[in-house]
Amino acid sequence: MTPLRSSRSRRGYNFAYLDEHTKRMIRRSILKAVAVPGYQVPFASREMPLPFGWGTGGIQVTASVLGPDDVLKVIDQGADDTTNAVSIRAFFARTTNVRTTEKTSEATVIQTRHRIPETPLIEGQILIYQVPIPEPLRWLEPREAETRKMHALEEYGSMHVQLYEDIAKYGHISTSYDYPVIVNGRYLMRPSPIPKFDNPKMHRNPALQLFGAGREKRIYAVPPYTDVKSLDFEDYPFEIQRWEENCEICGADDTFLDEIVTDDQGGRMYVCSDSDYCAERTAAAGKIPSEAAE
Amino acid sequence: MYVAVKGGEKAIASAHKLLAEQRRGDTDVPELTIEQIKQQMSLAVDRVMTEGSVYDRDLAALAIKQASGDLVEAIFLLRAYRNTLPRLATANPIDTATMTVRRRISSTYKDLPGGQLLGPTYDYTHRLLDFDLEDGGAAIAPADTAPVDNQTEIPRVSDVLNAEGLIEQEIKPEGDPDGSDVTREPMTFPAGRDVRLQNLARGDEGFLLALGYSTQRGYGRNHPFAGEIRMGDVAVEIMPEELGFAVEIGEITLTECEMVNQFTGSETSPPQFTRGYGLAFGGSERKAMSMALVDRALRAADLGEEAEAPAQDEEFVLYHSDNVEAQGFVQHLKLPHYVDFQSELELVRKLRAAHPTAHPAAAE
């Protein structure tokens, strides 16, 4: 057997996997995205060692902004210990050696899928969203050539019509996640599939919010303190989900709750989806999580 | 009692170990070598190189081994590696007329300059399992082959037709080759033919096969003939700026397919034959033919044909042809979606409660 060339060892990878030219290309796209809030900037997305649809957009954005002094937090469904969050965190730990954390307040860069942390973000932090489908008009118009025109002309009537049809049919808007927003009074934007519960957190957030869609090759951004308005009507204002229950571990009554099925008799309990927030609250109250749950 | 529903680092590490075990199989059986894969699974290597977009038999064979023979997974592995390679130079366009052919057939002419050369092909084999291969197989008798004259270029069938003006002219677009590259710039629509061809060359063989097949069954019919299929070795040259002349850096094996398709003509052009083009690494002939059919189908708009079938829809075809993208997004459904699902659960309960025919749940 002919041995493979020795330069092809794992050690041959650059800091954060991507080469510096690629990172620079991505940072240029990010700068453009920040300059035009909510506008989807096409970028030459790369194949990553993780599959498309598993956070490659977020990973490429993270890889491009991460420096050796950063502290990285990765969450999926609000939790640090979900398998894909573990895998992405391990990827960056392996390719960068940056410090990782589960604490929202300690992190300088947070990569997320499907949630915004409950702990309010602060200036200087970057929140990076993994985005499956960046185009908010996609379910209304499958063609990219068309939707780009609609954005250029600010032609968002069809989205309002869809929301109106919901109200006519059900009496309320039936979009519960990936709820469309208008950024900076101009671009219609898809907040990635976060629950609409999290939408208000995007509005005038002190942190920089970056969105990466790897397979669809788009980057967009919400700069700090930018207006983000969830679409609604004067007589049907936007509202978020509320639970009748509190978190069974920490007792929080103002967080997004995951429903845990506990038996096959219809038994269920509700716990915070944000595992760090829940643990912090539990620690502050002097309880041990496992005891609290019993 | 709250059961830990969230996975963790330990579970992932164990899964990787189980995968390694599964890949290796029974350790009493000798381990596959890269050389064996390269030599004896060469068509798998060809497919992985084609769709993995990198001509390297060693790496493709390694990817196949690592992926336990799952070719789409192997393509993904190779693509992710390819990304990290520096681009040292851009090769000159290859000239397939100078190909050292091992196979060359035309279905449009009985005989033609350069002749018909069947070469190594599964065509005309009877698909009967050869039980002699079960344990080793017998020695292979050498084939009787006529000497091929590779001193002269073998003209393409399309050039023969072109001499009579029966086929559309292939006019080089201005600035060609312009080096546009879908791996370096995201696609925009309408895409140029160069982008389309690059996308199709990297595209999933199964997807293109089905689309090509659909055009034959009437969804965007374009009356194809396999004008020519040739497989063989072509020199790759680069032109280092400081030298000012081209230097050959190696040879690659390619399969090229030129479809000749009917065209009834339009207001601006008389009836003539049109072309569809397919090119793939190695002996990926099915891929090259499928690509040629789909390339021709996608030219509908350029030729002023009605474009209503899926294979003629540029955005539909080009956005869904990449199996690395497609397999990732389909399989991401395995990732947790409990936050979205929770939101939907909430909504469905709310909608059901408001619905006049809703029955109370049995458990409640």
Image: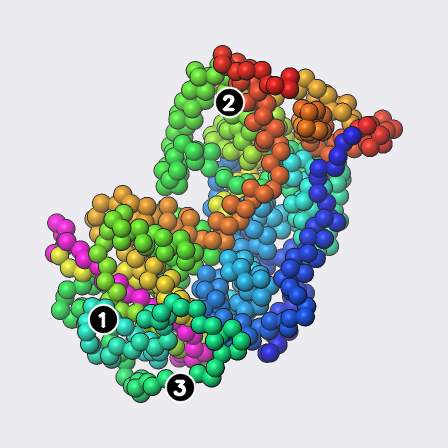
Residues at discs 1 and 2 both on one chain: no
Residue with the mark numbered 2:
A174
Tell me what residue is drawn at x 56 percent, y 22 percent. B347
Mark 1 in CB contact with mark 2 (< 8 angstroms)? no
Q: Residues within 10 Å of mark 1 (few under 14, many from 20)?
A: many
Q: Quadrant of the C terminus of chain B?
A: top right
Residue with the mark numbered 3:
B142
Tell me what residue is drawn at x 60 percent, y 71 percent. B32
Question: Relative to A176, is B25 above or below?
Answer: below
Question: Relative to A55, is B204 above or below?
Answer: below
Q: Chain of mark 2?
A: A
- Which structural element holds mark 2? loop
Q: Amino acid at mark 2?
A: Ser
* Lower position in the chain sequence, tag 3 or tag 1: 3
- Which structural element holds mark 3? loop
In 3D space, how far apart are the residues under numbered discs 3 and 2 (Cα atoms)? 71 Å
Asked whether B246 falls inside the magenta stretch, the response is yes
